[in-house]
Amino acid sequence: MDKRDVASILNDIGMILELKGENPFRARAYYNGARAIERLDVDLTTMIEEGTLGDVDGIGKTLEDNITELVTTGSLEYYEELKSSFPPTLFDLLSIPGLGPKRVKSLYENLNITNIGELEYACMENRLLDLPGFGQKMQENILKGIENLKVYRDKYLYIEAYEKAQAIVDKLRSHTDTIDVDIAGSLRRCKEVVSDVDIVLSADKSEGIMDLFVSLSLVEEVIARGETKTSVRLKNGMMVDLRVVKPYEYPYALNHFTGSKEHNTLMRHIAKMRGLKINEYGVFNTKDGHLFSCRDEKDIYAIFDMEYIPPELRENRGEIEAAKSYKLPKLVSQSDVKGLIHIHSIYSDGVNTIEELAEYARSLGYNYIGVSDHSKSAYYANGLTEEDIYRQIREIESINSRYDDFEILKGIEADILKDGSIDYDDNILSMFDFVIASIHSNFTMTKDEMTMRILKALDNPYVTILGHPTGRLLLSREGYEVDIEKILKKASEKDIAIEINANPYRLDLDWRWCKIAKDMGVKFVISPDAHDLKSFEYVSLGVNIARKGWLEKEDILNCSEIWEVDKGGI
DNA sequence: GCCGTTTTCGGCCCGACTGTTTTCAGTCG
């Protein structure tokens, strides 16, 4: 049991305590304990052995005992006891926006609602109207929330699907009969959200491979099993299709099952015009059935006098035209990224010190990081006061003086306030190397109001980057209504970069806008929005999105060897 | 449940928003 598991259980305990209506500060003590554990940089087992756990701020006698029990025995009796006081499905209600512990408790105790299905039914029967604290509007919102959950069900974030798929591919690759194996489908195209996983594998015989596939520990049930195709549902609910093809068929199958459907349709059309036929088994001459032999996908596109189209671009958004005239972009890659911008430190809601962040980035080979904590209005995230900023800048300068091959940039993620102004005055803003302006409050404005608000923020001469431009959270929250086109145009005029926020839940700006923005002359930063060291990895997800959006390294500011952005202001 | 004392009990993070109320509770970030 590692730190993350422990923290997650402490959080659960806090939540159940709230549900039970216990002293809210007791619940908070567990939340605080979880945070304290997450930010520990020493091994938990070591701390327990040395008896130093109780010295940690926020961990008292009770939490120390509980954590010790968790780590040494793998479970906690108190937690199991708490969990058993409610039906397990009751916790699902908390994922509906507007429902917190208090309301869920009331629904359970007054209407005996124990799961989302029962809640939906109760709403239909108007049974929430008479409940204290509920009303018509609340009931409508709950129904809307349930509707959204249904839409999002059976959809998975790229990162979750990718990790599962990669684990499966690794296992399949280890089978002696496997010759080639790859992820295909929307996951290979790096879509931000996927509904299932396709894996293509080449082998001369499939039986042993299928046996291995259905016996993987990730697999919950086998939906269908055949010689060439087997479908399973994983324990997280995700469907995975495995297709086994003959080695010579592999490139065609990989190409076909990578899609997209629209890309394939156009390719088939082009083939037909040339008297050819393309499908998962090959590229054939329609007349005599002759198979064009291909070693890889590059060969397939070459048959049609096209350059190789990377999977990310296969969305029928002009890539086939561009490939015909050999004008595809030279897509940015992970190794082009030279520095990480938008990183939170312990000063606001990050868990690492500036020194730890810098050392880790340096060890990964980056040339610079841009520290950008939250601004003063972001109370929930411990936003920085002016005094904090002076202190932080002094610390950064002191650490920087020790490096000649690395730089820590002084930045801020400043809130765009309701009226479009930026959270600090010009004097403060002028001290930073870069200013990310982001919206974290007042999401429910009209589209016009929100657009005006952001446009005004972009007029601030100190702003250098617009952070997560739509505020969306994939599979959980729509972005705020905003006229993106106007925003991009203004950003282009004012030389303000647009963030591609690489957090797996954000991936915002959406890739569908990237090419449009690029054509307007907009520059980008790919940022991890990191709150800990682990999330530095997210930058690769941002690179995926940039690639999907046709971007090249020249379009991305943090692909420069050194940070060359003009300071804002005059 | 934790912490720090005015040392054994009282305070603990804030503000906006929404929908419920008729002065505020619950949720969210």
Image (tube, coloured by chain):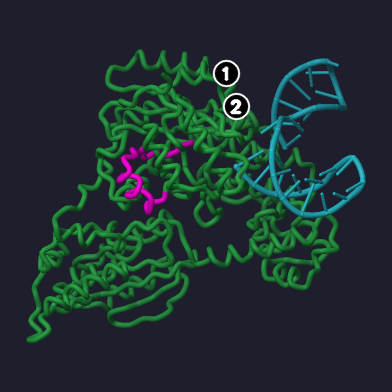
Q: Is residue A511 magenta?
A: yes
Label 2 Cα neighbours within 10 Å, binned few <14 / some 14-19 / many ≥20: many
Amino acid at pointer 2: Lys
Q: Do the residues labelled 1 and 2 touch (CB within 8 Å)?
A: yes
Against A441, residue A96 (above or below) is: below
Residue A376's disc number: 2
Front one among A161 and A415: A415
First in sequence, mark 1 or 2: give its number.
2
The tint of chain A in the picture is: green
Q: Residue at x 39, y 23 (%)?
A: A409
Residue beneath the point at 29% across and 37% down:
A337
Question: Which segment is the magenta one?
Answer: A510-531
* Residue A182 image point, x, y percent: 26, 63
Rendering colour (chain B): cyan
Tally the marks: 2
Which quadrant does the C terminus of chain A fall into? top left
Q: Is A19 within the magenta? A: no
Q: In which quarter of the image is residue A213?
A: bottom left
Q: In the image, what residue occupies the spot 27% across and 21% down?
A: A405
The kind of residue on which mark 1 rests is Glu
Q: In which quarter of the image is residue A565?
A: top left
